[in-house]
Image (tube, rainbow, N blue to C red):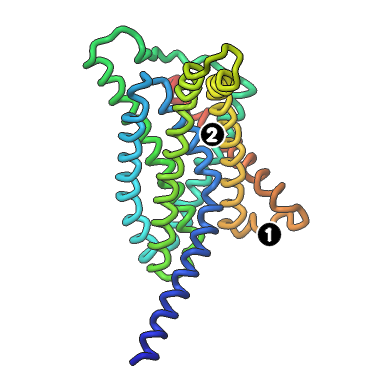
């Protein structure tokens, strides 16, 4: 009886070690999406009245948790009954990531003006109008989060497809929780950087004192941090997409064997992203003419 109990503990410990190891691998695989998720949400959570930034961010965070509660069971059912569907979704997700990355690169070199009449929430509006604007932006952020959450879950699941369903559930759930808490926790710090800076400047007794300099740095750093995250996120999108193509499409897995993966995978991402962007652009123009 005693030996059976200790054998059970040993099995549990082995499973936990496996889950921990696979969670680490899955988190690395999803790091690119997390970078893009961080950049997107930092941008969407900024621009509100200072006192409303954290409540809005909390509303988006709750929506993100709800998104994952919807996505996870569907992903596990597909994994159990149709593993091929996971690989198909993974490749389709890779195409979406490559397209998004290519679109951002194209937009950088060939910028065009978006004629969107956005209303600043800091203008003089009634409380109902401000709440309506907030609700609209929160819903848009949650929809974007849903798309990114699907990608995170599928990529994490793709790293443990050969494992048992128990391990899959544990690993992917851990990654989903880490992604949500980590991303929105960092976003909360980012969007409050300027407020922290202003507080330090107010606390400083000298105009050019140490606290004033730190405060000025934080205030001026906020837009630069968001822009840097956008660049890092774009590069990560291309690399993650290329990695998906290289590992999930057998033909590509054996193409250019002499080229290192850190060169080959971004190349695949750029090529597929460029082709997808071209196709989408042509379709949009055709639909626009009709």
Residue 65 is left or right of residue 110, and the answer is left
Quarter holding residue 287: top left
The image shows residue 2 at horizontal and vertical percentages of 36, 90
Q: Quadrant of the N terminus?
A: bottom left
State how far apart marks 1 and 2 are (Cα): 26 Å
Q: Nearer the viewer, residue 134 or 122?
A: 122
Residue 136 is left or right of residue 42, and the answer is left
Q: Residues within 10 Å of mark 2 (few under 14, many from 20)?
A: few
**Which residue is identified by label 1?**
254
Quarter holding residue 81: bottom left
User: How many numbered callouts?
Assistant: 2
Q: Residues within 10 Å of mark 1 (few under 14, many from 20)?
A: few
Q: Nearer the viewer, residue 116 or 173?
A: 173
The image shows residue 123 at horizontal and vertical percentages of 34, 9
Q: Quadrant of the C terminus?
A: top left
Reply above or below: 82 against 198. Answer: below
Q: Nearer the viewer, residue 169 or 48?
A: 48
The image shows residue 103 at horizontal and vertical percentages of 56, 30
**Which residue is identified by label 2?**
279
């Amino acid at each position: 009886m005693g030996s059976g109990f200790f054998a059970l503990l040993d099995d549990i410990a082995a499973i936990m070690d496996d889950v921990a190891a696979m969670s680490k691998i899955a988190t690395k695989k999803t790091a690119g999406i997390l970078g893009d998720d961080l950049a997107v949400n930092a941008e969407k959570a900024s621009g509100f009245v200072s006192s409303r930034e954290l409540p809005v961010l909390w509303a988006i965070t709750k929506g993100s948790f709800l998104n994952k509660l919807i996505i996870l069971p569907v992903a596990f059912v597909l994994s159990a009954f149709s593993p091929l569907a996971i690989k198909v979704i993974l490749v389709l997700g890779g195409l979406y990531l490559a397209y998004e990355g290519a679109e951002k690169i194209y937009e950088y070199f060939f910028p065009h003006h978006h004629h969107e009449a956005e209303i600043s929430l800091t203008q003089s509006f009634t409380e109902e109008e401000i709440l309506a604007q907030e609700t609209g932006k929160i819903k848009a952020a949650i929809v974007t989060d849903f798309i990114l959450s699907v990608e995170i879950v599928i990529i994490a699941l793709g790293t443990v497809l050969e494992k048992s369903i128990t391990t899959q559930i544990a690993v992917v759930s851990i990654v989903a929780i880490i992604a949500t808490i980590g991303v929105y926790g960092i976003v909360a710090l980012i969007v409050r950087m300027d407020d922290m800076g202003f507080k330090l400047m107010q606390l400083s007794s000298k105009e050019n004192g140490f606290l004033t300099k730190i405060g000025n740095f934080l205030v001026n750093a906020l837009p630069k941090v968001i822009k840097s995250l956008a660049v890092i996120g774009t590069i990560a999108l291309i690399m993650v997409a290329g990695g998906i193509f290289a590992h999930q499409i057998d033909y590509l897995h054996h193409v250019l064997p002499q080229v290192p993966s850190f060169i080959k995978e971004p190349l695949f991402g750029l090529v597929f992203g460029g082709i997808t962007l071209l196709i989408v652009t042509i379709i949009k123009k055709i639909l626009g003419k009709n």
